[in-house]
Image (tube, rainbow, N blue to C red):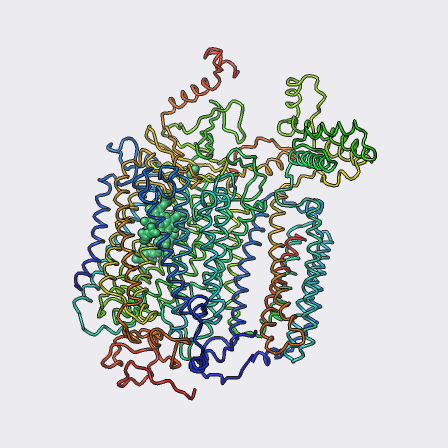
């Protein structure tokens, strides 16, 4: 039975492939364009990456032709995959308390500020 | 393999083979596996002000990454084409496309190793990177010491401690050992440069206290000493000067430029973690395809599911790279 | 025998409740200030601790009620099951009304507990609601290390700085704080994770390497309190024993003063000149 | 190398009949050791985990010894193991003891006994499949347990043993200098966790595929017994949570062996070593670890909940009260289970806003648990109860789960957790849920499915004796721990009595230890009963409990391929005492709708199939 269902869907894979190559070129170009604004750059390249991923998923991995189980399987996975970094963010990405590590001292001294900054007091964080 | 049996009217479950369902579930777990890595990378990066992004810090080669993306996409493309050929019972064509895929994955690993080589030769390895001036200076002296040590051992100086070897070195120079003499002299000169630098670095407190205070303290401690506060820039100049010196040619290949990179070690850790595990997945994929290729002309329809499932796996590997590329190379 | 088993499952919750009821009297209860027989036994010595205790008692009441009711229900169904030997069982797949009821009632209770406690948590941890007085002048920096607590006070009259200052005062395993005003300490760790745990004060906060975490509390009664470590930090985890001495402000000032004299005493000069050199 | 043809699998008969005919007697090795038969693998898991329970229990008793008689020579084993210290438990050794106790209990007892043993044994039988979807993978999942056991075993002997608790928090676990002596032990520990992770991973993918795709005709999702639901949801939890732990484990291995710095901040001076270079953050580990390990506590509970639901219904001769709400409650526990992990980190220095979020989600997880609890009581209500060992263990499960769950509420409330975190209150909580709930459920399941496994019944008298002794020993050991916790006794203390405010608790600890020893003795009764009944217990027919679910329509023990008649399912699993069932009080899932005078013996296998 595996034999029959393989040929079912007539996708022109070459076009998909062409599109993927184009996307890769775009990311590369975005990098070389020297976009100053980090946020814009991130949005652009991640947008391209997501587009590529969608193409690979839908066509190469045949998700377009699968039943609804794909949503049952992939929706929770994606939710978790996005949720984990988001949940880590308030603790690891943002520091609620004063970080006291050499890298930060160095950065502070390099910017010509006073080396003995005060402990982060509640007012400052708010 | 697919022996016919009447499909029961009441077949429960999904209309896909177990193997494919299993593969998709496995891919679900794989997504979580890479989520942990990528997620950790993202939050660590956001949480580290001054994360290294400049090429001179990271030695990231965007071109290599882009080419590798292309290589993986192309190989993915060949997999789907191969699977299509299997469906059309054109087994030799399928074999050929899979062989391309295999070749491309080798190419991918080749480019990856080239990149790794670049990293290693710049010593961008976890816990090898100096994160501030002091560590950079220390690293230079440590590496110079290693060079001296190794050279002396190579030139036949016996003894364990550096001091013993030094005495042997002086003796050897005294004996005027023919052709080796110039080498020995260069080494001795290099050694004395190292001794001076390391003494300098050891006594150097300029980096930890404000320079004015340091000056006064140093004056008080060692009046008349010729040591000046050592700065990273000073060391760089000094190395440049030494490198220009023909005499030491060759000895410097081991010594890296002093180049502090804040959060460099964390960067290297995450970089190698993610690309390393991705490469491991590539290798597993190569094994999966290798098993098909080993069938040679015996390849038949029985392998269709295998190719489909390894194909799914391979596309997943491709997907991971699609995200790693912008995250590691561009952003 | 059937009744025996039904009784068996009712016997133990009764024992459990009895044990809980006699516990405070048996001194198996919260550690309080001073000697265990005093009136303040089992009572927290900080306002925040009292809040925590009250919350504990509230939850204790709620859970006790739930515990008793569920076990009465369990006992009832068991005894009926034992009595109705051989009778054909009730053929019922459930009841929507019941189902809804026992979803909604616990929801209400749980939401109530959730919201009720938020305030205590905010007071304890959210830095913007720390008492002004505590934030203004942190009393000391407490650095945990394997296996002791190192305490650094600013010199009398000065403010605590993030970086050690030449005139800072140091002690080990002995933290003095003034009473009757909110005090804040800066908690940090020199090596692995530790946890600053003062049982009588109901304060607990992990010390994280690389971070400085402010902790505040207000001791209302002078006395000696325990300070222990509550995060596994190596083989000596159990012996990170220290004390917190709470004393009136004047006495605390005197303590710092003495500490400074002691620290600046080089053993040669007499005590007085020690005071002189900080001009 | 294609896969099992899905079309053929539900047709168990075709397989069974053809298979049996063409079947050769398997060699001993293929049959008992490298077996791919899910039943044998299940039994292998069961016996292995029971042995590991002994090991874990022995370690627990050593822990208890130190708490009752601090620094006193351990009897018998003391002089044998560490004569050089006068048979005393050193603090390092104590750390290793509770670390390995927890590791063995969690990774080698509870998880494998639920998913490994009963998951394997029950899933194909209860959904009417002839085997798992991937039998070889199944075999591997058992055999991957052994490298894990070997690694954990090795970590006892290299260096001083792992010394950072089962939670393995960095930097204690990350830096060699932090726990001198634990060096390679910690590495092996991590390796062991990775292996057991692979084992569980293979298992869960296998279970999911089997349950989704290999159900017999008529076995719709909402006709599956709760056991299957429990296993199914557990497998989902495992599939999504475990990779994160594996990933985090690799990161810790990297930190320990390859110089990476994920969890190591800069400038930390440990044990007078040079300051670390670092750059990472220790909290990251805690998040990643609990992202797995909180769902893991439900992995350690949900299958037991499922099995208890089945056993209760059967022993009360009554349909499960609220089947669908039970299923949804389980799913809700699983879903919420993914977003509560932060409740282990309330005092860790996490962002307080995050703490609030986690607190609320943790509170909410009590809801589905409430639904489950009340439904169990509802199931017993009005039942025609058979007070046998199975039933008693199940009631103990419910009762103990209530206690354990309610103590969870104290900790879910952040302010009280400030006080209770890392005190014995926590220890009481999780032993009530892990031992009190899960293991009592497992003890019930052992007796319940024993006839199906070995074709013989277990001894009732010994079973009840075991139950009573364990129940008393258990409560005697762990109930007082609540008091210890309230009195502020921190966990993981080798000698709490060093602190004056804890001195007066020693007599209490002493009593607890003796209860623990009683509980230990009780487990020998279980062992004896198990071994005796395996060979000498009274033989039984297909359906000794008059139960409904599919496995009881297969022979006891089922042969290769499980069913001699292809099961077709006509109804849900809990049709006890139905008015349709006539004289009997049960209606098996395989019984066709017309129910006149159908007896228990299945029809002869149909050769034409
Ligand atoms: C099987 C295992 C299991 C289970 C099921 C649970 C269930 C729960 N656990 Fe537990 N937990 C552990 C195993 C488990 N836990 C372990 C091993 C640890 C320690 C790890 C370590 O540090 O080593 C731990 C630690 C732990 C902590 C961290 C404590 C700390 O370290 O500071 C917390 C905090 O919130 C917590 C909470 C809960 C809650 C709210 C539930 C809830 O799911 C319970 C819900 C059940 C009920 C509430 C009872 C039934 C309901 C009713 C009768 C309805 C009415 C009730 C009300 C209205 C309140 N647990
Ligand atoms: C499923 C999990 C599980 C189970 C079943 C148990 C069972 C037991 N545990 Fe458990 N325990 C944990 C999981 C579990 N534990 C965890 C996760 C921790 C936290 C660790 C950490 O902090 O990192 C912990 C910690 C822990 C502590 C706290 C240590 C500390 O913090 O200092 C204590 C102390 O009393 C304890 C005691 C016991 C006892 C007495 C049993 C008893 O119920 C055991 C009963 C069984 C037996 C006694 C076996 C019978 C067999 C024999 C007696 C045979 C003897 C054999 C030979 C001599 C060969 N455990
Ligand atoms: Cu410090 Cu435990
Ligand atoms: Cu939890």
Residue B251: x and y in percent read 76, 38
Residue ranking furthest to the bottom: D608
Residue C113 visible, this orientation: no
Nearest to the observer: residue B115 or residue C29: B115
The answer to which quarter of the image holds residue D329 is bottom left
The answer to whether A10 is drawn above or below residue B269 in the figure is below
The answer to whether D581 is drawn above or below residue C231 in the figure is below
Residue B214 visible, this orientation: yes
Q: What residue lies at 50% left-to-right and 28% top-to-bottom? A: C160
Tally of numbered tags: 0
The answer to which quarter of the image holds residue C88 is bottom left
Residue A106: x and y in percent read 62, 36
Residue D317: x and y in percent read 25, 72
Quadrant (top left/top right/bottom left/bottom right) for the N terminus of chain C: bottom left
Nearest to the observer: residue A1 or residue B216: A1
Would residue B238 be found to the left or right of residue D391 on screen? Answer: right
Would residue B113 be found to the left or right of residue D100 on screen? Answer: right
Ligand 3 quadrant assignment? top left
The answer to whether B225 is drawn above or below residue B315 in the figure is above
Residue D552: x and y in percent read 33, 75
The answer to whether B49 is drawn above or below residue B173 in the figure is below
Q: What residue lies at 26% left-to-right and 70% top-to-bottom? A: D538
Would residue D350 be found to the left or right of residue D385 on screen? Answer: right
């Amino acid at each position: 039975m595996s034999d029959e269902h393989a040929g079912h869907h007539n996708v022109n894979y070459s076009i998909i492939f062409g599109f993927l190559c184009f996307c890769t070129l775009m990311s590369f170009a975005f990098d070389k364009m020297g976009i100053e604004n980090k946020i814009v750059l991130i949005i652009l390249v991640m947008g391209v990456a997501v587009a590529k991923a969608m193409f690979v998923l839908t066509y190469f991995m045949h998700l377009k032709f699968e039943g609804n189980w794909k949503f049952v399987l992939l929706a929770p996975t994606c939710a978790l995959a996005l949720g984990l970094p988001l949940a880590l963010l308030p603790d690891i990405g943002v520091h609620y308390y004063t970080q006291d590590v050499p890298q930060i001292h160095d950065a502070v001294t390099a910017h010509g500020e006073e080396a003995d900054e005060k402990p982060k007091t509640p007012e400052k964080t708010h | 393999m697919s022996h016919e049996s009447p499909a029961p009217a009441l077949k429960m479950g999904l209309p896909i083979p177990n193997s494919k369902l299993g593969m998709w579930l496995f891919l679900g777990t794989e997504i979580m596996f890479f989520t942990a890595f990528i997620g950790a990378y993202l939050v660590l990066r956001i949480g580290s002000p001054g994360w290294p992004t400049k090429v001179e810090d990271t030695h990231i080669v965007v071109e290599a990454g882009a080419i590798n993306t292309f290589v993986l996409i192309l190989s993915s493309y060949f997999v789907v084409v191969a699977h299509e050929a299997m469906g059309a019972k054109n087994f030799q064509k399928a074999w050929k496309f899979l062989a391309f895929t295999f070749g491309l994955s080798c190419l991918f690993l080749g480019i990856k190793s080239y990149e790794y080589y670049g990293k290693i030769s710049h010593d961008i390895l976890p816990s090898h990177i100096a994160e501030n001036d002091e560590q950079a200076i220390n690293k230079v002296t440590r590496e110079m010491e290693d060079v001296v040590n190794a050279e002396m051992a190579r030139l036949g100086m016996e003894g364990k401690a550096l001091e013993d070897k030094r005495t042997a070195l002086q003796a050897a120079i005294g004996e005027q050992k023919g052709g080796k003499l110039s080498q020995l002299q260069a080494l001795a000169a290099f050694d004395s440069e190292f001794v001076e630098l390391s003494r300098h670095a050891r006594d150097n407190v300029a980096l930890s206290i404000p320079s004015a205070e340091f000056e006064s303290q140093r004056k008080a401690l060692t009046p008349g000493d010729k040591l000046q506060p050592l700065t990273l820039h000073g060391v760089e100049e000094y190395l440049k000067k030494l490198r220009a010196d023909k005499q030491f040619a060759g000895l410097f290949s081991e010594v890296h430029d002093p180049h502090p990179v804040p959060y460099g070690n964390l960067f290297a850790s995450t970089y190698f973690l993610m690309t390393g595990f991705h490469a491991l997945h590539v290798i597993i994929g190569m094994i999966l395809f290798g098993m098909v290729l080993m069938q040679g002309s015996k390849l038949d329809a029985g392998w269709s599911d295998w190719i489909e499932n390894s194909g799914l796996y391979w596309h997943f590997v491709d997907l991971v790279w699609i995200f790693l590329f912008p995250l590691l190379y561009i952003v | 025998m059937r009744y025996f088993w039904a009784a068996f499952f009712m016997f133990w919750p009764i024992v459990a409740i009895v044990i809980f009821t006699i516990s405070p009297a048996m001194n198996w209860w919260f550690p309080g200030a001073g000697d265990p027989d005093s009136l303040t036994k089992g009572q927290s010595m900080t306002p925040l601790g009292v809040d925590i205790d009250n919350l504990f008692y509230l939850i204790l009441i709620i859970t006790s009620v739930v515990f008793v009711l569920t076990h009465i229900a369990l006992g009832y169904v068991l005894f009926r099951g034992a009595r109705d030997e051989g009778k054909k069982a009730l053929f019922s797949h459930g009841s929507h009304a019941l189902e809804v009821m026992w979803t909604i009632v616990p929801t209400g209770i749980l939401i109530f507990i959730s919201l009720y406690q938020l305030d205590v948590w905010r007071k304890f941890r959210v830095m913007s609601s720390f008492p002004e007085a505590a934030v203004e002048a942190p009393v000391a920096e407490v650095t945990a290390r394997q296996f002791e607590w190192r305490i650094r006070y600013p010199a009398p009259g000065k403010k605590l700085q993030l970086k050690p200052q030449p005139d800072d005062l140091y002690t080990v395993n002995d933290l003095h704080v003034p009473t009757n005003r909110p005090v804040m300490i800066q908690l940090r760790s020199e090596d692995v994770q530790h946890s600053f745990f003062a049982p009588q004060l109901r304060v607990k906060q992990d010390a994280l390497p690389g971070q400085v975490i402010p902790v505040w509390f207000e001791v209302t009664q002078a006395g000696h309190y325990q300070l222990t470590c509550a995060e596994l930090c190596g083989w000596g985890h159990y012996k990170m024993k220290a004390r917190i001495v709470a004393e009136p402000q004047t006495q605390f000032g005197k303590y710092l003063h003495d500490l400074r004299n002691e620290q600046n005493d080089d053993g040669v000069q007499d005590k007085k000149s020690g005071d002189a050199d900080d001009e | 190398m294609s896969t099992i043809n899905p079309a053929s699998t539900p047709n168990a008969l075709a397989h069974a009949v053809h298979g049996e005919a063409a079947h050769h007697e398997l060699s001993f090795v293929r049959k008992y050791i490298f077996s791919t038969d899910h039943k044998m693998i299940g039994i292998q898991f069961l016996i292995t985990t029971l042995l590991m329970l002994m090991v874990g229990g022995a370690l627990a008793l050593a822990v208890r010894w130190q708490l009752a008689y601090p620094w006193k020579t351990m009897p018998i084993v003391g002089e044998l193991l560490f004569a050089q210290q006068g048979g005393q438990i050193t603090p390092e050794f104590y750390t290793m003891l509770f670390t390995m106790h927890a590791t063995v209990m969690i990774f080698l007892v509870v998880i494998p006994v639920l998913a490994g043993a009963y998951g394997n044994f029950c899933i194909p039988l209860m959904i009417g499949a002839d085997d798992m979807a991937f039998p070889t993978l199944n075999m591997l999942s058992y055999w991957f347990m052994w490298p894990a056991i070997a690694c954990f075993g090795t970590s006892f002997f290299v260096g001083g043993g792992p010394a950072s608790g089962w939670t393995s928090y960095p930097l204690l676990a990350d830096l060699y200098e932090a726990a001198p002596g634990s060096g390679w032990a910690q590495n092996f520990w991590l390796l062991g966790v990775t292996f057991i992770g692979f084992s569980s991973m293979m298992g869960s993918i296998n279970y999911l595929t089997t349950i989704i795709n290999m159900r017999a005709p008529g076995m719709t999702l909402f006709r599956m017994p709760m056991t299957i639901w429990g296993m199914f949801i557990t497998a989902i939890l495992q599939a999504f949570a475990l990779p994160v732990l594996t990933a985090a484990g690799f990161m810790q291995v990297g930190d320990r062996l390859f110089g990476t710095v994920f969890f190591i901040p800069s400038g930390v001076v440990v044990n007078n070593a040079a300051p670390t270079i670092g750059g990472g953050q220790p909290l990251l580990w805690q998040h990643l670890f609990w992202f797995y390990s909180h769902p893991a506590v439900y992995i350690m509970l949900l299958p037991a909940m499922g099995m208890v639901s089945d056993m209760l219904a059967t022993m009360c001769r009554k349909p499960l009260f609220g089947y669908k709400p039970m299923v949804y409650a389980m799913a809700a526990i699983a879903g919420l289970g993914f977003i509560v992990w932060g409740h282990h980190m309330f005092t860790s220095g996490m962002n307080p806003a995050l703490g609030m979020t986690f607190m609320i989600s943790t509170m909410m997880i009590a809801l589905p648990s409430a639904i489950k609890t009340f439904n169990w009581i509802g199931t017993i209500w009005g039942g025609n109860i058979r007070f046998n060992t199975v039933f008693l263990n199940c009631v103990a499960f419910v009762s103990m789960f209530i206690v354990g769950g309610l103590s969870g509420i104290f900790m879910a409330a952040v302010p009280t957790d400030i006080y209770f975190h890392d005190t014995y209150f926590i220890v009481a909580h999780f032993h009530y849920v892990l031992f009190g709930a899960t293991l009592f459920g497992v003890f019930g399941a052992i007796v319940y499915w024993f006839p199906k496994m070995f074709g013989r019944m277990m001894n009732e008298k010994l079973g009840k004796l075991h139950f009573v002794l364990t129940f008393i020993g258990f409560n005697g050991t762990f109930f007082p721990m609540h008091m210890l916790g309230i009195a502020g006794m921190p966990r993981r203390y080798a000698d709490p009595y060093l602190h004056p405010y804890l001195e007066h608790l020693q007599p209490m600890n002493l009593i607890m230890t003796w209860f623990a020893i009683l509980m230990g003795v009780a487990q020998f009764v279980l062992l004896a009963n198990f071994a005796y009944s395996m060979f000498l217990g009274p033989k039984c027919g297909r359906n000794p409990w008059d139960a409904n679910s599919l496995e009881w329509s297969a022979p006891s023990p089922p042969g290769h391929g499980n069913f001699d008649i292809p099961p077709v399912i006509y109804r849900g699993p809990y049709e006890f005492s139905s008015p349709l069932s006539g004289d009997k009080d049960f209606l098996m899932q395989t019984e066709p709708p017309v129910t006149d005078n159908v007896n228990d013996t299945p029809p002869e296998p149909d050769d034409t199939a």
